[in-house]
Image: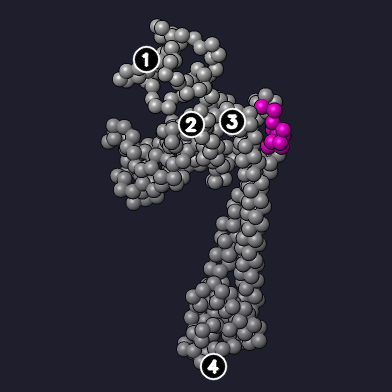
Amino acid sequence: MKPLFWDAINPFTGQPFTWDDPNLRWGDPSYYLEPGDPGFVPYAASTPAPKPKRKPRNYMASNPTPDPIGELIAAGEDLYDGLVQHAVGCNIKQNTPAAFRADLDALIAAQNALVAAEGEEPAAYATLRTADSNGKGFIARAIKVLSISLGNDWTAEWTATGLPDQTVGIPSTQDKRFTALGGLAAYLTANPAKENAPLEVTAAIATTLHTAVSDARQGVGNALNKTKAKLLARNEKRDAFRLRFRGTINELEQCLSIDDPKWYDFGLNRPDDPATPGQPSNVHATALGTGRVLIQIDGARRANSFNYYKQVVGTDAEPVKLLNTQGTQHTVENLPAGATVQITVTGVNKAGEGPASEPVSVVVT
């Protein structure tokens, strides 16, 4: 039996209750009988009441497209696995496993190319630093040699050497040192009597060093341009895959109900009952010195934020929560030097906290 309210609809006929309904029991409170209650009278034309309409589900909110590239690729792999299992059963037409895999592989290849290009930058910068340092040493030697005849203070005679800023000294910036090398090479070429071979102050050496800096600067420029081109290409593949990812979820809406457990096979939230996040992946802990440790993670499936924990071995009986943040890295401070600290991270969403990552140990410096 259930309480009766004013203007209530009979759930068995789909019509308002009438005062002579055999299943009504007037009183305070009034109620009506249901099948199985003593005295229930079946209705001649029993018609179940229409089910209340559900409020439209915001699938995008339930299964947002990840922003970090690592999470997007990981989510793509999960979604692909689900397509392999259920594409036929779900009658997937637009976002087939083959089409999805092609866009995902294109993104992975573009991301790998970007990472490779970024990896070339440090070597290019190191080459430039070495060339600049060699040039700086030459400029210092040249100033000592030339000051014998030109003096220690700036005069009009120093102008021809190409030293910038009308200053007898090593220029303060790389650009100015590059200019000075070119000027000294030209000056010593025009004034060979000013050279000092034993101290390696010659026009030939200045020219060689100037060329080395020029080549190194060009190398850095080439590396940066290559990275920029790979970034643009990666972003193009990323945007294309994000459309594919979103389109696949939209197509799944036509096949899966909001409480279908198959959503989990795609690595997605079940919209009617969101799953907690997956386990965070690739957790790294790096000692930075002065009692600090940097924690970095790739993320976790379905996570909206992350809980960071630390446990100082021999001091903390259990992991101590540091903070909750959406960031995929965090620096822990004020840790005891020499201590071994175990780091764990969990993902968090509306459904709760997911499983902790495997502990990562680091010795504090």
Q: Badge 3 local density, few (<14 within 10 Å), some, or many (20+)?
A: many
Q: Which residues are magenta?
A: 90-100
Of callouts 2 and 3, the N-terminal one: 3
Q: Is residue 38 above or below residue 340?
A: above
Query: Quick check: is 165 in the magenta stretch?
Result: no
Q: Is 142 in front, or is 98?
A: 98
Nearer the camera: disc 3 or disc 1: 1
Which of the numbered marks, if any, corresponds to residue 25? Answer: 1
Of callouts 3 and 4, the N-terminal one: 4
**What residue is drawn where x is 37% and y is 15%?**
25
Label 3 sits on residue: 266
Magenta: main secondary structure: loop
Nearer the camera: disc 2 or disc 4: 2
Kindly report the distance in space between the C-alpha atoms of the residues bearing marks 3 and 1.
51 Å
Kindly report the distance in space between the C-alpha atoms of the residues bearing marks 2 and 3.
13 Å
Pointers 2 and 4 in contact (CB under 8 A)? Answer: no
**What residue is drawn where x is 59% and y is 57%?**
121
Percent coordinates x, y for residue 275 in the rendering = 48, 30
The part of the image, by quadrant, that contains residue 222 is bottom right
Percent coordinates x, y for residue 202 in the rendering = 61, 78
